[in-house]
Image (cartoon, helix red, strand yellow):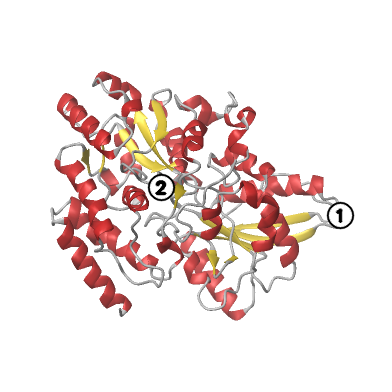
Amino acid sequence: MKVLRPLAALAVVAATALVGACAQPASNQPSDEYSSTVDQKAGEDATTLTLWTFVELHGKFYETMAAHWNEQHPDEQVKLDVNVMPYDDMHNKLQLALTSGEGVPDLVDIELGKFPNFTKGTPALEDLTSYAEPYRDDLVEARLDLYSKEGKTYGFDFHVGTTLAFYNTELLEGAGIDYTTIQTWDDFKEAGVKYHDATGKAFGTADTSAQWQANLLLGQLGGDYLDADGNVTVDSPEVVQAFEILKDLQDSGAVAVPPGGQPDTEEAYGAINKGDFAAMIMPEWFMSRFTAYMPDLKGKIAIAPAPVVEGAEVKTVGGGGTGTAVPSVGEHKELAAEFIAYAKLSKDGNEEIWRTLGFDPMNTSMWQDEAITHDPENEYVQYFTTNPFDSLNAVSDSIGLLVSATSPNAPSVNNLFTTETLNDIFESGTPVKDALAQAQSDLENELGQ
């Protein structure tokens, strides 16, 4: 497959205020103890590599890939010493270790919203560009760009996080709506109004604690929260247009603010499970929330391409992310880099990412292998009425990203929007232009621009 690199200068905005949003459900977040159940098949001469992560299932994935690696590389075997820590603790500990040069791990997961903090100045991370080369032709290039600086790549992600639409077909059929006719945002609004009139309930969500839908619209409109130099542009015409589209959906009755402020919250899972919302526009990894928290909807949820702005070159964007990096002071940095490239970028690794984590992996050669993507034993294939890879392949040549995430100013934008600006627009009724003008002023003052 030829993977388009649309809007190559773009990269997605900081994932969300919710920790680990692109990873696994909250029940899989780290505890104080990590107990391994995976046989890494490492011999006595294996090189021990320390690995830090903030998601327990990531650790188990890496250990599984170590077993695969060791079978294929008997002369370069590795034994992973996995350390699972709370999100903030791990990132803070990593910053201190890199600054002091002591106690640095060989491999470390860095969440997307934190990654710009570790690429300021001269990064203390190994340049992984050459290690990606054997796989590059099959990769979604923009996901490498997301963890790059000045042409050098410093981290490898688990997934694309392609933004898709999730529709409750049972509810829509009851309201006389065919989700397959929803192609544009105008179609989405028309369906939402019809659904609201028929049921008295909201069709979709107006999010106040995350920017998934706003990021999607900005990608389609060619806008961004920051320019390439990190200057704030949140009152630009494209940002205004994106939020006016979302506000119009709310004013028409098509969408409403969900409990918790976005679909990926415990409160929202319950509301969606009992039928309070019929459509969710979310990254692909949201599939795992259905299987984990909304069992009543098995066999009722269809996955489809997200609605688009008419004439948009970019149809969807990636959302969320965790980049695995190799600190440059590590004693075994070359072996660590070779292993993590295999684990995160190879077809073998991407098959395991799909099977165990349910992500849409970066290596799209796997997207074409129906023996894997349509495996009837897979829990995601069993749960949803449509196969996610049918939608992923439909948009694979037009996956865009926003420039903001690689900027050190991205966390400031994300924090303001998810704590104040989105609430001003969708809860307090502040006119979009006024709310964004205030955000522009507040961010310029905070960042000294």
The answer to whether residue 258 is above or below residue 414 is above
Crowd band around label 2 with a 10 angstrom C-alpha radius: few (<14), some (14–19), many (20+): many
Q: Position of residue 275 (x, y in %)?
A: 28, 29
Q: Position of residue 286 (x, y in %)?
A: 43, 41
Q: Kindly state the secondary structure of the residue where label 2 is placed.
A: loop
Position of residue 445 in the picture relative to residue 102 (left or right): left
Q: Which residue is mark 2?
A: 314
What residue do we see at 29% from left, 58% from top? 418
How far apart marks 1 and 2 lie (CA) works out to 45 Å
Q: Nearer the viewer, residue 32 or 47?
A: 47
Q: Which residue is mark 1?
A: 75
What residue do we see at 35% from left, 30% from top? 167
Q: Quadrant of the C terminus?
A: bottom left
Q: Position of residue 246 (x, y in %)?
A: 23, 46
**Residue 355 can be seen in this image:** no
At label 2, which amino acid type do we have? Val
Position of residue 239 in the picture relative to residue 304 (left or right): left
What residue do we see at 43% from left, 22% from top? 299
Dividing the picture into quadrants, the one containing residue 401 is bottom left
Dividing the picture into quadrants, the one containing residue 350 is top right
